[in-house]
Image: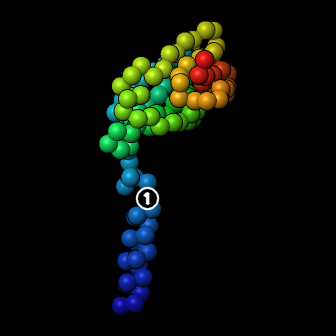
Amino acid sequence: MKKNSHFLVLSFLFLQSCSFLEQNRFIETKVISNSLNEQIIYRYYQTGLNDYKVDFYSVSQSDSVKLFEHFVNDALFSASTYRISEHDNEITIRTKLFAKEKKLITRNGKSIIMTNR
């Protein structure tokens, strides 16, 4: 009997720690850039009543890499939060959500700049 109760407790703790039980509610995906080798996208998730999460990804063939993530409230979600421009092999995402500028280069060599300017 004691072994069964340990098993039940461990099973409960395992299930409680699984992330699939706490999935955020997916809202939409937007494609920022689409080339032959790679797509740059962002996805909105609702995490609470007036809170949202935004994840930026680089998608190449069947592989995806998370570039940035941040959280916004309802006022920023419904406003035009991002101004996105693409020139040659560089994407600039302008937003007031970051205090510092963030830069990175994807596996396929695309430069991504997240800035508040």
Asked which secondary structure carries label 1, the reply is: loop
Seen in the picture, residue 21 relative to 42 is either above or below; the reply is below
Residue 94: x and y, percent? 55, 19
Q: Residue furthest left?
A: 49
Residue in view at x 56 percent, y 33 percent: 68
- Residue 37 seen: no
Residue in view at x 39 percent, y 39 percent: 51
Amino acid of disc 1: Cys
- Residue 99 seen: yes
In screen coordinates, is 82 left or right of 117? Answer: left
Front residue (pair 64, 30): 30
Assign the N terminus to one quadrant of the image.
bottom left
Residue under numbered circle 1: 18
Residue 16: x and y, percent? 40, 64
Residue 91: x and y, percent? 59, 17
Assign the C terminus to one quadrant of the image.
top right
Residue in view at x 47 percent, y 28 percent: 42
Q: Quadrant of residue 31?
A: top left
Seen in the picture, residue 20 relative to 110 is either above or below; the reply is below
Residue in view at x 37 percent, y 77 percent: 8
Q: Quadrant of residue 13?
A: bottom left
Q: Residue furthest top?
A: 87
In screen coordinates, is 106 left or right of 27? Answer: right
